[in-house]
Each structure stands twice: as C-alpha cells, then as structure tokens.
Image (cartoon, grey):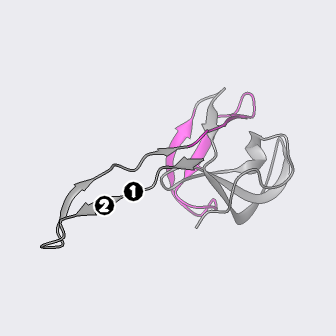
Amino acid sequence: MSIDRVEEITDDSEGEPTAATAASVTAAVRYYSVAPGVRLNVRSGPSTSYGIVRVLSEGAKVPIFCQTPGQTISGPYGTTNIWDNIGDGDYISDAYVYTGADGYVAGRCG
C-alpha cells in the first residue's frame, strides 16, 4: 500500500490554509473465491448471531480488507474462528473462502 503525504500550505500572516494537496491511497486488493456451489450469507459482524445484510451468489469472489476472530464455523475449507471483512460492516466466515492458508492472510480489523 502506498500513501501520499498530505501537505498543508499556510499563509504566514493569518495562519489559515491557502492550499492543500489531496491524499491518495493506492492499495493492491486481492480477491478470493467463495467455495463452489455456495450462496454465502454476509453478516454485519463476526458471528451467525449478527444479521444477514446480503447473500453472495455462487462463484463469488471477494476482497478481504481485514480479518478478525469470531464464532468458530466449520465449512468446506475447514473449521476456523477467522472472519473476513469484505466491505464496510460486511463479514463472512473464512471457512467458506479459499485463501490458500489456514491462518490470517490480511491484517487484523480494528
């Protein structure tokens, strides 16, 4: 990930900003496949006790922005307590996502 620094130029006489550069964040986002033949519930938190916010269609590919521990779930790719954040407030169990690893593949959420 690269982050350009935000710089503020101020007027010496009043101390008010006169110009600013925009910050840009560029990150390489990797997409992972959801288990074949699965329509996966996306929840508002890392547990089945959280509400369903949407359902992913079969063959979906998802970004993993961060991961967090939560309820332990068994699925096609094993048993895990890792939940993947795939969007703002959107979580799915890592047991249904092929990441190629048994542990964390992204940073911890929060």
Q: Which residue type does callout 1 highlight?
A: Val
Seen from the viewer's position, the closer of residues 27 and 43 is 27
In this view, the residue farthest toward the front is: 12
Seen from the viewer's position, the closer of residues 22 and 75 is 22
Q: Name the secondary structure under disc 1.
A: loop
| Residue at position x 81%, y 57% in the image | 80
Image x and y of residue 52, in percent: 52, 51
Q: Residues within 10 Å of mark 1 (few under 14, many from 20)?
A: few
Q: Are marks 2 and 1 in contact (CB under 8 Å)?
A: yes
Res 8 label: 2
Seen from the viewer's position, the closer of residues 109 and 71 is 109
Image x and y of residue 53, in percent: 48, 49
| Residue at position x 48%, y 52% in the image | 88
| Residue at position x 63%, y 59% in the image | 48
Residue 84 lies in the magenta-colored region? no
Q: Which residue type does callout 2 highlight?
A: Glu
Q: Name the secondary structure under disc 2.
A: strand
> Which stretch did the figure color magenta?
27-56
Image x and y of residue 16, in percent: 17, 68
Left or right relative to 37: residue 4 = left
